[in-house]
Amino acid sequence: MVLKRMIGNQSANPSGFFGRFVVRMMARSNFDSNKWMVSLLDIKDNDHVLEIGFGPGTAIKEILKITTNSHVSGIDISKLMVDQVTSLNQKAVTKGRLDLRLGEATSMPWDSNNFDKVLAVNVIYLWPILKPVFIEIIRVLKPNGMLALFLAPIEMMDALGFSDLDAFTLHTQEDVLKACKDAGFAKTDKTSTQMGEGTGVCIKAWK
């Protein structure tokens, strides 16, 4: 239980040597979900995309690879992740295609009506109250912009012991859809995919 708690805390906000180890685990375990989510975004060249809680940068790397003129921004609460992903993608930073910031999802440092698409993979569990985060996401989205949220298989979250940790809130699909509506999203949709650990779900919401 102690090890699971340590892993859970580092998954939420990686730091130090053990944080680097957990990040490598996260990159492997979340690889398929990140690829799937990026495919669902249908990103076009010149799209401005924001990832909240980008972690080891798997989705960011994929977006930069499949497009030539899109601009990617990211925000994460972990300085380790901001520094590491910035260093790994220095070429994109130099070209002005990548902008990574340290900060919270409830107060983001970008102007209103800024992003075509917002992505968040496996970070919704770090938001105990969803509505304030969704209101802030609506603010930075352009009109008709889309939010895509990945909800991990409950079986995986239980196996990792995250359901027992104070830092994590296991929101149901119904909780998320209701919070989207309450925050002011115009419409929502959801789709699912079978993964090794169970069924992963993507909830989309449009401004």
Image (cartoon, grey):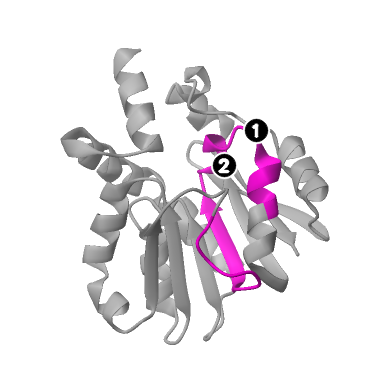
Packing grade of label 1 (10 A; few <14, some 14-19, many >=20) is some
Instruction: Look at mark 2 in the image and give the residue it sits on.
Output: 124
**Which residue does the image show at 30% across and 51% down from the upper left?**
81
Amino acid on which the number 1 mark rests in the picture: His
Magenta stretch, residue numbers: 108-135
Residue placed most toward the observer, 167 or 148: 167
Q: Vertically, is 167 above or below 206? A: above
Instruction: Look at mark 1 in the image and give the residue it sits on.
Output: 171
Residue 96, x across and y down, in percent:
36, 81
Mark 2 falls on what kind of element? helix
Query: Can you say which quadrant of the picture contains the N terminus?
Result: top left
**Residue 19 lies in what quarter of the image?**
top left
Residue placed most toward the observer, 78 or 38: 78
The answer to if 133 sits in the magenta stretch is yes
Q: Who comes first in sequence, dot 1 or dot 2?
A: 2
**Residue 177 lies in what quarter of the image?**
top right
Residue 190, x across and y down, in percent:
72, 52
Residue 6, x across and y down, in percent:
31, 23
45 lies left or right of 99: right
Residue placed most toward the observer, 184 or 124: 184
**Which residue does the image show at 23% across and 65% down from the upper left?**
88
